[in-house]
Image (cartoon, rainbow, N blue to C red):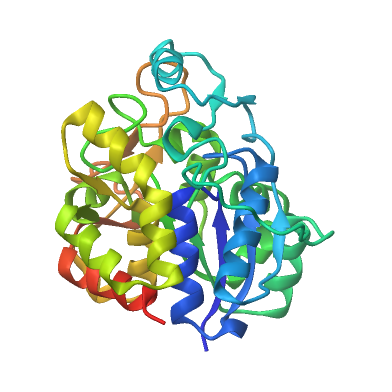
Amino acid sequence: MRKLIIDADTGSDDAVALVMAMRNLPKDSILGITIASGNVPLEQGIANALYVNELCGVNIPVYAGESSPIARSYIELDNMEEATKHAISESPVSTSAQYVHGADGLGDIGLQPQESQCEEESALDFYKEALSNNSDVEIVALGPLSNIAKLVQEEPELISSIKHCYIMGGCSNGVGNITKTAEYNFWVDPEAADIVLKSTIPITVIGWDPSYLDGTLDRKKVKEIDEINTEYSKFTNGVFEKVRVLVLDILGQDSYSLPDPLAMAVFLNEDIISESIEANMVVDTRDGPTRGACIIDFMDIEMNPRKVRIVQRCDNNKFFDLLKKSLVE
């Protein structure tokens, strides 16, 4: 049985990725869910993860992690125009993405999580315990890498117990989604992303590029999900409605990307990967127009032995089939 820890900043796409994990894995396979600030502030991310527990009828422990990036301050922004101005202003401050996911991170469709609580143990202490007692833990990281970077910094002797880490973050083709060059998770905490990528953890990066190229839902697929007609399918289309309208208004596209569900799908079935490379990847941590951008040694010019697997393309049909399977009763 696989042993999984999910690290999230529970917005709408994280929530659907959690549903996929909970619906496809034995409940004992998921050791815990750790939360960091990102799409939404820490407390909201915790509440949303607990809501998904409730939706799926499981009780996976949820742990509070970092409330801000490891070297930056963090503020909430729920206005798209203000968020865009902030991102291009080259401010060192990181922001939430509530302008995409809604103030509650779940599309503002009126979901009311029960008054359940996360664990008293911190995310870092949970990682210490889990990695001390298990030698083959896998991690799916869906948000800024603040929690995992802190683990690498403070408990480097334990990371040998991490079998593999699947990271949703970055972009290998230079196309960003928060700035011209950066993907949101790496932009929020570029220092953390750089620390984790430079560590010895075996890593697969599923970035923004395969997400917008191959991890998309168009109107036809949305209708197919609607026709499944379960609590899971209703939840999925509901939490993504704000994203769908936003993409339609801004880009004129009647389709939208599901980055975190795609990353979870790759973890669940690596056959979804159709193109990938092995290369050294680091992250630009300087303030400025390239903050959070990925620097990739495609030609192995530096001959750095530290390489990660970078997913460039995925099979959309296989991804969508797995997503649909996850939403059936």
Q: Is residue 66 left or right of residue 244?
A: right
Q: Is residue 186 left or right of residue 177?
A: right
Residue 295 lies in what quarter of the image?
A: top left
Q: Residue 137, position in %: x, y?
A: 57, 74
Q: Nearer the viewer, residue 128 or 110?
A: 110
Residue 307 at least partly seen = no
Q: Is residue 93 left or right of residue 213?
A: right
Residue at 19% x, 55% y: name it: 214
Q: Residue 70, position in %: x, y?
A: 64, 35
> Is 229 drawn above or below residue 144 in the view shown?
below
Q: Residue 151, position in %: x, y?
A: 67, 53
Residue that protrudes farthest toward the right in the picture: 120
> Is 58 drawn above or below residue 316 in the view shown?
below
Residue at 25% x, 46% y: name it: 256
Q: Nearer the viewer, residue 18 or 272?
A: 18
Residue at 30% x, 73% y: name it: 228
Q: Residue 107, position in %: x, y?
A: 46, 44
Count the labels in the image. 0
Q: Nearer the viewer, residue 134 or 117?
A: 117
Residue 72 lies in what quarter of the image?
A: top right
> Is 89 drawn above or below residue 40 in the view shown?
above
Q: Quadrant of the C terminus?
A: bottom left
